[in-house]
Each structure stands twice: as structure tokens, then as C-alpha cells.
Amino acid sequence: MHFALTLLLLAAVLALTWRYLGSYLEAVYSGRVGWLSRVEGVIYRLLGVDPSREQRWRQYAVSLVVFSGVSLLLTYGLLRLQGQLPLNPQHLPAASPLLSWNTAVSFITNTNWQNYAGETTMSYLSQMAALTVQQFTSAAVGMAVAIALVRGFSRAGASTIGNFWVDTVRGCLYVLLPIAFVAGAVFVAQGAVQTLAGPAFIRDALNGATQLIPRGPVGFMESIKQLGTNGGGFFNANGADPLENPSQLTNLLSVVLLLSIPVALTYTFGKMVGSRRQGLALLAAMGLIFAVWTGFTGYAESQPNPAVAAAGVVAQPQGNMEGKEVRFGVLDSTLYDVASTQTSTGSVDSTPDSYTPLGGFGLLTGMMLGEITPGGDGSGLYTLLLFAMVAVFIGGLMVGRTPEYLGKKIQAREVKLASLGVLVMPVVVLVTTGIATALPVGRAGAFNSGPHGFTEILYALTSQANNNGSAFAGLNGNTAFYNLVGGIDMLVGRFGIMLPVLALAGALAAKQTVPGSLGTFRTDNATFVVLLLGVILIVGGLTFFPALSLGPLLEQLSHGRFF
Amino acid sequence: MITQLRSAVLLAVGAILLFGLAYPLAGTGISQLLFPHQANGSLGPNGSTLVGQPWTGPQWFHGRPDPYNPLRLDGVSGASGGSNLGPRSRQLVAAVRAEGVRLRRMGINPTADLVTTSGSGIDPDITPQDAAAQVPMVSRSTGISESRLRRLIRSLTVGPEWGFLGPSYIDVLQLNSALARLR
């Protein structure tokens, strides 16, 4: 009963962010918001960028790749040099070259996969100047690409799709910075730490216990970690750590933050293409899958943990509490993990590795659908639009007409690019999972035995290729093999989709708009939503079913067997 | 290409200055000014109410059987985190069984939270039911009447926030500090 109220409140808040944040985002990206125009002007002058000059898609893509490459090098450098740099009260040494590579790729691609424990590996300077900064820029880059694609639909006969520098700077300044700052203060007021004073040493006079309590600049990283759908926390336990996610209020705030921009972008999309109903149709598809997955995973976690039940010492009236915090309980913990796996955030407030087989299945499949329900900041919208184009193409084949989407003819080039964008992720996940399970160095990473060990490997590579960052954290990922392969997965999963999307944006912008007629296949009604859901579920389901049956499904069916 | 590279370097460095330094430092300043207690870790004389500690002996209420890693002072093992044992792990069956036996021997009728570990490995809280299960043991050992202990538990139970955000719970350090004052 309590949980139903939580869901109602979440839905109400998201409805407001959809309407108002969505409308604000449209105003930001069309240049009608200017309360920081002085700062903005100075930045463009320093960068040597003329904000009124738009770019063709190739220039836009080159700017994006060059900026990401420079960010990658700077992040790598800071992690390698942290031992010599200030703000390092624990005197932590440099991160190893391969770990620095994996971590730098992870943060510039908005993945935030972490092969390290933050509080014992990263100096305060690294957490702030190497990692937190990328949580802003990588999210802004994702949003910029989504907006560029939507411009492709809303323009006709145009040669340009916007200016990468302007879009990225505006996303950071007008959207991420103000919201993250206010939310960061709320996290601290609730109990998240925010200090540069180093760990606190305390001796408890009551029980004689001594503690070294790790601290750091946590609260303000926490807010952008969620808002930017990044997911990389300060502490190893991520959102389960009470110094990072202290209260029931911050737990819900986290869920609101990570869903708000991806949800709002569907409104922005509708407004930009001149039909709110088009955005609503996409939101409906996202929302239906999200609701079903939340219900399914919550139900699975409300069942007893099989291993705890087999010990025969307790009843489990709440459900599976292994790996969950008392202050959150089963359902609120599950909501957080489901929301973060389906937004490419990857933060956790409970241990996915200890979820029931079907609960873990819910988290894993949430990522396998391609991070579109509602997906990450920007990446959710542009990936879903790829699926929408494939759906329109299939619909066109069924009725025997040239498919159109939002007045643009979807022809061979568009279908090829959309299919490429849709298929990159499954190919990367399945090929690298195959390699990891075939090689001893890959199998050695698994912590649990039996089918669960295979799921740990599959989950890790699915998470990285989808730029999610959630983990079945038993896997020992800080090895040469996983650092290297994971880094490649993250890069291909990010830019292997972004570049086809930008090419599509260019191709669509150049096309003329065809006026709709009676025979036009409508894309703003329930029929289209069902068709889109069918494409999403069939692509995700068919490609991953064999792998899933070796992991969580086999584990679920192993009645009475323990490994 | 060269102008692109120049813009990229300047934007990346500028972002580090603005979002990597100015933003967290301004946040730290404001936090230390407005919420110094929370920003420094909610510390009291005997520890942080947000970081669980191990309690031994029948004179205290016990938290969950977490590893409480920040206790170890060697740094490397000081990270927070869950057991990561899977739902069909033999190791988990054995750990839960051993914990159940240990609790029974102490006179506690085990509950699910008291035999499972948390996601953080430093869970500071237990539910009112977990505390109630320990009342007979604590009462026998301290001589404080069971009804008085139950009143204490009721007075320290918090949540759900706003009446519906999650379960009710009790901070173990606060409970034991209050218990120490009763003696």
C-alpha cells in the first residue's frame, strides 16, 4: 500500500518534469533561454566558436569525437598522476594504466562502470576533477546528439544540424548545473557527506570499536551522478552507502533525478517536431515497458531468497533482504535499481548480484532492450528513435508503402543507418561475452559458481556496451582482460550508435517534408505504440534469449540445487 | 581540424575548472556553512549514526551481520559493499545457517534482516521487529525490564518518511546509546 503511494508520487512529479522541464529544454536548445548569456558569451569567445554558425553533420561528429578524445586523455592523465597531485589526504597512489584506461573511457561515455572501490582508490581531486566533471559533459554530449537528431526531423532541405559546442555548453550551463547544485544541497542536508577533510577516526567508548570513516566531496557528486544518468558513485557500495544515499527521501529523489531528463526529452521532441502527440507515443512505449519491469522485478524480489530459505532458520516475510538496506526495504530498493538499469545510469542502492534469479533477470533485460525505457540523457531518445524508424519501416512493408516518419521518407540509407545503430549493441555484447566465457582469463573473473557466474560475465559486458555501469559486482573486473575488453565495449557502444545517429540527422535534415495524407501510416496512436513495443521486444528478446537461458533462467529452474 | 582541437582542449580544461573544481568546492563551502553536522559525516562521540558498527555481547542490541569494513584500518579492505553472494550460493546458505545458530545460542529468535547482510556492508539500521527479537536477551543481561526496552524501541523508531517512503527502522547506535543512559 505504502509503495503504491510512492509510485503515484513519482508519476506525478515526472508528469510535471515532462511538461515543464521538457518545454524548458526546447527553449534552451533553440537559444531562447539566456539568463547566463554573459558567461556563455565569454565561453564561446575563449573557445573561438561563433555560436550563430551551425555545423553540417560531419563537422558536428568531428567536434564530438575530438572533444571526447581530449576528455579521455585528460581523465586518463589525472588518474595516472593522482599520487603527485594535491587533495589526496589518504596518499593514494596512481591508478594502474589499464584501470585508468577503463575508468576514463567509462566516464567520458556516460557509462560509469567502476572496476575500483572509490574510497580506497581515488583521491578527492580525481573524484572531482577527473570523474565529476565528465558526469556533466558526457550527459550534455548525449543530450546534444539527441537534439541534433530531432532537428533532422524538424528541418527540411537544411544542410546543418546545429552547433556541437553551443549545444554542449547550453546543456551543461542551463540544465545540469543549476539542478545538480540544488539537488546536491538536498543530499547533504539529508546526511550525505561533503568535505575535503579526509577520513574521520573514531573510537566508540560503548563497545570499544575503532572506525576509520571514509569521507569526501560526495553529496554534490551524487546529484549529478543521478541527473546525468551517470551512476558512478563516490563509495564502493554506491547508493547503498548511507553516507551517499542517507535517507528514504534521497532514495526517491535519486529515482526522480535519473528519470527526469530522459522523460522530459520526449516532450522536447514533440514540441520540436510540432506535435506533442508524437512525443507522447514514445513516452507511452517507454512507460509501459518501465511499468511492467518495475512490477515484475518488485514481485520477484518480494519472494524469499532461495539460499536464505534453504538455510531453514528464518521466514522472509518482506522478501529477499540479502544485499538490501533496512531503511529502504525490498520494494523501494528494487524501484531504484530498475530505474537505474533502464536509464543507463547504473547506480545501485541494493546489490544486484544478490537479487533472486528473476529479479536479476529483470535488471539485466532492462539493459538488453537497448536503454530506451526511458534510457540515458539524450541516448535514450536517439536510440528509441532508431527503433521507431525500424518500426515504421516494418509497418511500411506490411501495408506496401514507402515508409514515412514525421513527414520524412525513410529510404534505404535511413533504414541501413537505423539498423546499424540498433544492432551494434547486441553484436558487441554477444561477441565479447562469447570471448570472455571461452577464455580462462574471462572465466576467472566470476565470483559465484554455476549459472550465476555466467550471468556475472554477461551482465558486465551488457552493462558496459549499453553505457549503463550497473554491475553484478562479485565479478573481479580489475584485470587486464576486463579493463581492456570493457573499455572497447563502452567505446563501441557509445560512438557506434552516436555516429550513425548523426549521419541520420544530416540525411533527414536534407530531405523535404512530405505532407501527410489519408494513406500515411500514423505514428501518434496506439497502433504505432504496439508496433514499436513489438519491435523492441522482438529484437531484444530474440537476440538475447539463448544467453539469458544459460544464466538467470537456468538458475531460476535449478530447484533445490546450490552452487 | 586544428581549430576543432583547440576548441576541444579549451572546453575540456574549462569544464574541469568549472565542474571539477568550482562546482564541488562551492558545494563544500555551502554545505559546511549550512549543514556542518551532516557534511562532516553525522558524527557523534561514539561514531556516525550513518555507519553501522559491530556489537558483541548480550548487553547490546545487535545490527545486521555485516563485515563493517571501515573498521579495518589497513585501507584496502576498508571499502563498503555487499556480499555479492548469489541466490543459489552454497556459501550464502552456510553463512545464514551459521548466523541463525549463533543468534539462537544467544537467546535471539532470528529474523531475516539479522541473518542477511546489507548492500552497503555498514547498514546502521534494524527494523522494530529485529529489535523486538533481542529484547529478552538484553533484558536478562542488563536487568532493565522488557516493557521499558519496548518503550525505548518505540520512542526511537523512525520512518516511513512522509508516512509512505519505505519501512520503519531504528538506528542501532542511537538505540544502544539510549540503552547506556538507562543503565
Image: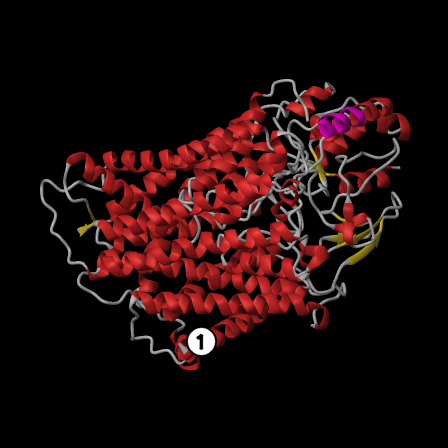
Location of residue B21 by image quarter: bottom right
- Image quarter where the N terminus of chain B lies is bottom left
Mark 1 falls within which chain?
Answer: B
The residue lying toward the viewer, choosing from A120 and A211, is A120
Question: Which residue is pictured at 23% across the width and 57% down the height?
Answer: A508
- Prevailing secondary structure class for the magenta stretch in the rendered image: helix
Q: How many marks?
A: 1
The residue lying toward the viewer, choosing from B33 and A72, is A72
Residue type, label 1 = Leu
- Image quarter where the C terminus of chain B lies is top right
Location of residue B66 by image quarter: top right
| Region of the chain picked out in magenta, as a range | B90-98
Q: How far across and down, in percent of the image, does residue B97 sit? A: 77, 24
Question: Which residue is pictured at 61% across the width and 42% down the height?
Answer: A439
**Residue A252 visible, this orientation:** no
Q: Is residue A117 highlighted in magenta?
A: no
- For disc 1, the neighbor class at 10 Å (few under 14, some 14 to 19, many from 20) is some
* Colour pattern of the rendering: secondary structure
Question: Which residue is pictured at 32% across the width and 44% down the height?
Answer: A387
Left or right of A516, for residue B144: right
Left or right of A170, for residue A357: right
Is residue A170 shown above or below A495? Answer: below
Q: How far across and down, in percent of the image, does residue B76 sit? A: 77, 53
Secondary structure of the residue carrying tag 1 is helix
**Residue A153 visible, this orientation:** yes
Q: How far across and down, in percent of the image, does residue A446 sit? A: 65, 39
**Residue under label 1:** B5
